[in-house]
Amino acid sequence: MNDITDYVITHRDWPIVQDDLYRALCVGGFRKDGWLCAADGENIEQYNDRLNELTGLYWIWKNTDIEYVGLSHYRRYFDNGGRLDEAAIRWLLQDVKYDIILSRIRLPWSVHHNICMTCGGETARAAYDAFLETIRERQPEYAEAFEDVMCGSEMYRCNMFVTRREIMDRFCGWLFSFLTEAADKVDVSGLGFYGKRVCGYVGEAMWTVWLKRHRLNVYDMWIG
């Protein structure tokens, strides 16, 4: 049995090539025969319209036990001259001893301002305040890191990663201790498509927040 799986999150029918490494995972009410679905098993799919692919991450955390695990998007993959393959993952995580593969983005403005431009300033501020308040309540030692990341211009993007199971478990245990609670504090009724997803966009910065307090050896790879 293969000990590495990269789960490809999708909310639509798309020509996803599945093999021993890549498995399609449906979210947002979409299903397709032969593909995994994040509405099965233990799940938080009721949050998908607000938290994007993070509902897929929750499903992976609660319903799988693969030793090395990754998350990609139906139209985005880590690119090392082509779609990242198993040999490259083993070389990076086992031979060279990187802890995690991520993709850093450097914005011309702050992470928070980027969300303001996508969702509107009032909506983005409401989400910022809800996350900060909930982090202070549930994970207070990360409050300063959250503020630093949101005011800074660098983050790891798209919730995409490949890492060892125990690292993902630690991150998810932290993230989901406050994520849905923070989302519940933000009233997105009446907002458009992007506004409703504001907590998902803030959530996308959480790998960066978490890593502020954990010294992991990160391999920064392009997403194609």
Image (cartoon, helix red, strand yellow):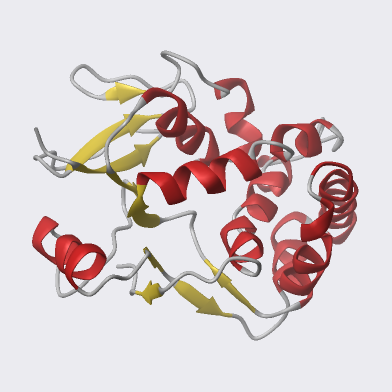
Tell me which residue sits at (45%, 17%) in the image: 39
- Which quadrant of the structure image shows residue 192? top right
Instruction: Answer above or below: position of 161 versus 155.
Output: above
Horizontal placement of 15 versus 49: left or right?
left
Instruction: Answer above or below: position of 108 versus 121.
Output: below
Res 168 seen here: yes
Instruction: Answer above or below: position of 69 versus 91.
Output: above
- Which quadrant of the structure image shows residue 93? bottom left
Horizontal placement of 117 versus 205: left or right?
right
Q: Nearer the viewer, residue 70 or 55?
A: 70
Q: Position of residue 137 (x, y in %)?
A: 89, 43
Q: Position of residue 203 (x, y in %)?
A: 65, 50
Horizontal placement of 193 versus 151: left or right?
left
Q: Position of residue 124 (x, y in %)?
A: 81, 56
Q: Nearer the viewer, residue 162 or 55?
A: 162
Q: Position of residue 65 (x, y in %)?
A: 32, 31
Tell me which residue sits at (57%, 31%) in the image: 48
Tell me which residue sits at (49%, 16%) in the image: 42
Figure quadrant of the N terminus:
top left
Tell me which residue sits at (53%, 46%) in the image: 170
Figure quadrant of the C terminus:
bottom left
Instruction: Answer above or below: position of 40 versus 211.
Output: above
